[in-house]
Image: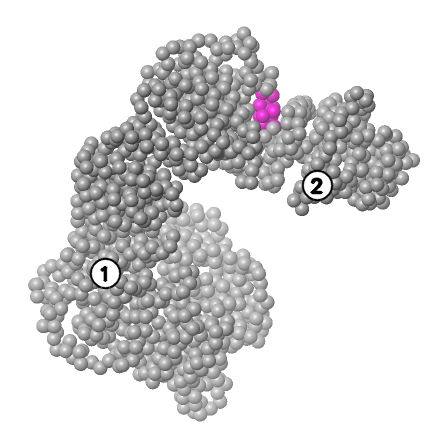
Amino acid sequence: MASRATEEISSTTTETTYEASIASIDEHDDENDTKERVLHRYFFQEWKLLKSLLDQIVSNGRVTDPSAVNKIRSVFDKYQEQGQLLEPYLETIISPLMLVVRSKTVELGSASDELLDIIKPLCIIIYSLVTVCGYKAVIKFFPHQVSDLELAVSLLEKCHYTTTATTLRQESTGEMEAKCVVLLWLSILVLVPFDISSVDTSVTNVSCFNGLEPSPLVLKIMEFSKDYLSNAGPMRSIAGLLLSKLLTRPDMPKAFISFIEWTHEVISSAADDFMDRFRLLGVVEALAAIFKAGARKSLLDVVPLSWVDTSTLMKSSITSRNPLLRKFLMKLTQRIGLTCLPYHSPTWRYVGRTSLLRENISMTLIDKDTQCINGLDANALIEHKGPDILQEEDMEVPEIIEEIIELLLSGLRDTSKSAEMFLEDTVVRWSAAKGIGRITSRLTSSLSDEVLSSVLELFLQGEGDGSWHGGCLALAELARRGLLLPASLPKVVPVIVKALHYDVRRGPHSVGSHVRDAAAYVCWAFARAYNFSDMKNILERLAPHLLSVACYDREVNCRRAASAAFQENVGRQGTFPHGIDIVNTADYFSLSSRVNSYLNVAVHIAQYKQYLYPFAEELLYNKIGHWEKSLRELAAEALSALVKYDPGYFADFVLEKVIPGTLSSDLCMRHGATIAAGELVLALHTCDFTPSADKQKSLAGVVPAIERARLYRGKGGEIMRAAVSRFISCISVTHLPLLEKIKRSLLDTLLENLRHPNAQIQACAPLIGILSPILYLANKSDEGFNNITLKYLKLLEDPNVAARRGSALAIGALPLEFLLTKWKFVLLKLCGACTIEDNPDERDAEARVNAVRGLVSVCETLTKSVTGSIFSFVDEDVALYQMLKDEVMHTLLKALNDYSVDNRGDVGSWVREAALHGLERCTYILCEKESVGFPGQMSGAKSEMEPFPSAMVETNQRLALFDASLATILVGSLTKQAVEKMDKIRIHAAKVLQKILYNGNIFVPCIPHREKLEGIIPCDVDSEWAVPTFSYPRFVQLLQFSCYSRYVLSGLVISVGGLQDSLKKASIMALLQYLEVTGNGENEKRRSRENLLGTDLLWILQEYKRCDRVIIPTLKTIEVLFSKKFFLNVESLTHDFCSGVLDSLVTELKSSKDFTKLYSGISILGYIASISNQLHARAFSQLLFFLGHRYPKIRKAGADQVYLVLLQNGDIIAEGKLDQALEILSETCWDGDIGEAKQKRSQLYQMAGLEEQTLLKAVDGKPKTNGEQRTSVSDENESYSALVGSSGF
């Protein structure tokens, strides 16, 4: 039934119907289905859709829907990497389309202007297949009747002389595709098995050509093709292909000679200009195609001329700057050489493998003599086929071959002067390598040995990386073609081993990855070329090196290439020890991560002894001294991971090599050796292996020796400090015997590193240099512990910001023993360090971040105890948790208000982010203690953190460690951060709140409206908090709860009035949707929400008075709400809210120099003045004040707003004076002379019946007495020029 249903699908089937049909087909068994159905199911699932589109095009004879072309191209583009999957469908796709092209050309004629409009979309589809499947697969299905030749030439002529204007659109116009398709069509039509002059209808007398003179049709094709050889697009290559097919016909001798002469003229007169570059490329590419397709007999006559042109052009300056031209010249050179040498299969060639499984199996049954004939022994080959080989040795080789081979060898060394041309050099060397292989296959045995010797000279000491790369490619080609005899492998393998590890330092980087990749390719070629009996000894040498590269190479492509070569050898040779297990471990995906390769894959392979020691030597000699810092550190860690397999070897041999390297003159070596020494000591300790006394003494002297050599100074001093910190940490864990003098020296080193301005060194010193080393190095007494603690606490007040940063981290990492006696002092000091410094010159965001982190870490250290309380007295335990609640939580909540800004931007966000994580961890500490029972009563005093009386508990109530008051402040503060403008902070705040609500181990109690919060913040949402349109509508719902509304609104206004457009739109939309209530009780709910929102906005204006960071976006928010008619409809709400806003504007706009604030304030005054109530006169009076403002733009904005107010509220001015007032507003140049503006303003005051006043006037409108007059405050921006200067214009 399914198959019948599939057959009934029409050409207009939609994608949904197609998917349903595929689903029905899938019910069948793949083994019983037809080939076509299996292909449709797995390899070309879009076939039904594509077929319907093509049928529609063919039935209409043209493309009626331009979008169909784009749909078809998008389907083909999916198969760009696997074009062979489309090949079974090419005939069905191409033949109907080409028939439409042919029929329309016949029907409309080449003179029709409509013709190109029809064939261009069709050619776009066909050329898309050419790019995916290649032209060879496509042109097989082009029509190739003899009569089509003239038709195609006329169509090409039409395309050639018809050019459209250039377009900037992304989609193609089809002009280029049409030319390419017609040229490809001609490339198969010119192969007609008749004399072309007999096909040319323009020739009246065929006999006059005698098969020698080119007919007009041929001349026309050559003319067009020559033009396209100068094209920069794909037409150049296709024109060369067409010329190679046309000129190598037996009836084209004169045309061929004339073209060669033309190319000689082009090459001889080549100039280094833009057009000549492309024409040279086209000419050389066409010659290479001709020498590939032509008969040897006809080509020999033009070899001298072509070789002279090639060698001359190769030496020119034009070629040195054009790698693509050099590539084509390499192709042409090798094909000239192949033309000079007759083709024959060399009897000396190595034939080691066959492609038939039956013959491979039968190899084990034939006798040894026959096996030797097909195998390694060159002497046996001469004995069996001596006469043939001797006859080959007598073969004459033209002298030109030596020059050709020399040129190809120089191509193997090809290197551009520019580093950006590296990939282009590769294609030149690759082409030269293939040419060496092809020409060597036609040489005698002795000459092939000379070629091999010349190739091996590329690996000499003075050669560059390009020579090594080209040499590897050439060796791989010789091996693949059986031209590298097994007898030569002992000379080749050492070279390949060196190439596998080729890495040459050049300045701050190294070169050699392409050489290592090519060397792995050689090993891959060996696996495919030789019998396992010939490769047995070779593989034992190659296996460790291949696996070293596969596990430890810096570049992922080299690791994968070496792994592929190893896998190929395991599969074909089968003699690698533990090959199957290693192949399963070191696969394509496991080697993609460098860390996984070093620490997992290599460690697994190293369990086999034959690979352990090569791995250790690779890390020891090549990797711990590598130029990349991160790789040195990873190599040291990887080296320590191998210790468990042979601790004695690493304790004796490896440490003996590493310790002297800590004083090496090379920075990379001494850094890597220092880290490696520490990691090895730590690994030996883990294995319960103790180094010898001499080694311990040497290790104890590493750091003093480094300090005596003054290696902390100069270049690399910072890197060495971090390495020494790690080394101290490692030897401390192992309790390496040290003298007291050395211990004190190491402690001083750690303290000095803490004071270093480099953040990475500071992080290394406390986090890995104190936890264990302090206990090990310090004096084991309370006095010794206190001295160290006090030393770090003193640094918290150091003027050096680097010292403050490091000491905060260090205190956070101190062990419990150092905190027991001074814990109160430590907590208070850290709380003080978390606040913004009073002195602006000493403010440092990183120091506060580290203080927050250190504070939380100290709290966790003090409260973590397996047996319960760490204190002997209950009162101390109570005091600790009381301080944690009152002081620490208050400090962390205060840190959420750190909005410091410097030239790096909002650096306070770093502090807020650290505080968010700290609040989460401290909340868990309090709740965990609360859950197990907290001894003692805590004070019932009012918390300093609570700004809202509604959230206070009764003073006579017993306060728990985590009560409703603290929960309200915590959740409110988190929601405030979750609706602010920084994406990173919003995400962190939402995730912290999510964890607090849904923590499975510790329940956080007393959270008001918990059910509503859980509905707003689901537990299964993770990554969507970064999307404003997802997060804002959820958190805005909390505005309906008075305990959270002020927190949420104070953060929301920052987003609503911010500069980021997408964030502003999302936040405004969420707020408006919240206010626009729908459903039952709509008016009452809306009135209630407006009332609460208005109250909260007034609170923000008072709480953040004169704080432009909050006030400006709040004013913008009020402006937006006024524009949406909120707060303007309810009389009582409008009066109270507008009165409060006017009071705030008096304070905020006075002497303000911020244009954004002034604009928003003026707009708000305009909205209030437009309301018909008792406040409009007061607002209008303040608005008129700005008509005489010192800044012209503000006067202009005020005048515009006054004009709008008068149009909307005519009651402000008497009806008889309204027209006169409007005339004054419209005709006065408010951004001109300020004197005139003030005069006009006075007239408007008189018309409105208002007294001129300033913003300094009392809010209630009553004039102040002389005693109450405030002292005049001088403004630093007394002039407009001062404001412009301060604004940065």
Left or right placement of residue 247 versus residue 1010 in this view = left
| Residue drawn where x is 11% and y is 64% of the image | 371
Is residue 363 shown above or below 880?
Answer: below
Residue 442 position, x and y percent, is 24, 75
Residue 136 pos. (x, y %) = 38, 68
Q: Nearer the viewer, residue 111 or 783?
A: 783
Image coords of residue 535 (percent x, y): 16, 58
Disc 1 marks a residue whose amino acid type is: Val
In the rendered image, residue 327, in percent from the top left (x then y), is placed at: 38, 69
Q: Is residue 358 left or right of residue 412?
A: left
Vertical relation: 794 (above or below) 148:
above
In which quadrant of the rendered view does residue 419 lie? bottom left
Label 2 crowd bin: few (<14), some (14–19), many (20+), radius 10 Å: some
Element at badge 1? helix
Q: Amino acid at mark 2?
A: Leu
Q: Residue at x 51, y 67 (%)?
A: 176
Q: Quadrant of residue 1117?
A: top right
- In the rendering, which numbered label is found on residue 495? 1
Colour pattern of the rendering? one colour
* Residue under the image location 49 percent in, 80 percent down: 223
Residue 51 in sight:
yes
Which residue is at the front of the view, 648 or 588?
A: 648
Q: How many marks?
A: 2
Magenta span: 1035-1049
Residue at point 24% right, 59% down?
Answer: 496
Residue placed furthest toward the top: 956
The local secondary structure at tag 2 comes to helix
Membership of 860 in magenta stretch: no
Looking at the image, is mark 2 or mark 1 earlier in the sequence? 1
Query: Dot 1: few (<14), some (14–19), or many (≥20) neighbours within 10 Å?
Result: some
Residue to which mark 2 is pinned: 1283
